[in-house]
Amino acid sequence: MLKDIILAIILGTLLGFGLTGGYFAVKKSSSVSTNPPQIVAPTVQVTSSTPTPAILTTQSNQITIISPQNQSIVANSKITVKGSTAPNSYLIITTQTKSYYSQSDPAGNFAVDIEIDSGANLISLNSFDSQDIQATSTLLVTYSTAKI
């Protein structure tokens, strides 16, 4: 059982990295311009002798999963992954056998119906906001029909 979970985590991680790399490759190839670069002469402008403090802003993209709970046991193979992330972010949800693509609404909420396999399922969620900042989260859900 432990070997299966470790193998599932490794395969899920590799699949997630593969999808993430594919997304960035497609995004990069679509932003390449066919026009030759223009050479612009640098200009220097002196406005003040006092230094201006640099303002550093950081942006973060996080995924909050509302349901299902991590390490939960479900009795149905079809589940809905609900949560929130940055507004209008692209989502890639991967299981061991399938990938699902979606987008969060303007408030950042999402709900994606997925199908999981019997046993332990490592679900990987990747979110890309409008500045291509990535957030990643994983979820372990076990599908079992056994009576507990």
Image (cartoon, helix red, strand yellow):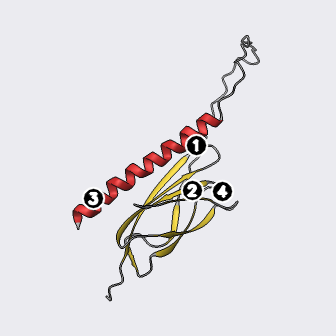
Amino acid residing under circle 2: Leu
Q: Which residue is mark 2?
A: 91
* Residue 48 drawn at (x, y percent): 74, 19
* Distance between mark 3 and mark 2 Cα atoms: 24 Å
Toward the front, the furthest residue is 97
State which quadrant residue 138 falls in.
Answer: bottom left
Q: Which residue is mark 1?
A: 58
In the image, which disc is placed on residue 6?
Answer: 3
For label 4, the SS is: loop
Q: Which residue is mark 4?
A: 87
- Dot 2 or dot 1, earlier in sequence: 1
Q: Depth check: 132 or 98 in front?
A: 98
* Distance between mark 2 and mark 1 Cα atoms: 21 Å
Amino acid residing under circle 3: Ile
**Which residue is depicted at the point 65% across and 34% down?**
31
State which quadrant residue 96 falls in.
Answer: bottom left
* Distance between mark 3 and mark 1 Cα atoms: 34 Å
Neighbourhood count class around disc 3 (C-alpha, 10 Å): few under 14, some 14–19, many 20 upward: few
**Comparing marks 3 and 1, which lies closer to the viewer?**
3
Proximity of marks 3 and 4: CB atoms separated by less than 8 Å: no
For label 1, the SS is: loop
Q: Is residue 49 above or below residue 58?
A: above
For label 3, the SS is: helix
* Residue 25 drawn at (x, y percent): 54, 38
- Dot 4 or dot 1, earlier in sequence: 1
* Residue 1 drawn at (x, y percent): 23, 68
- Quarter of the picture holding the C terminus: bottom left
Amino acid residing under circle 4: Pro
Amino acid residing under circle 1: Thr
**Which residue is depicted at the point 22% across and 61% down?**
3
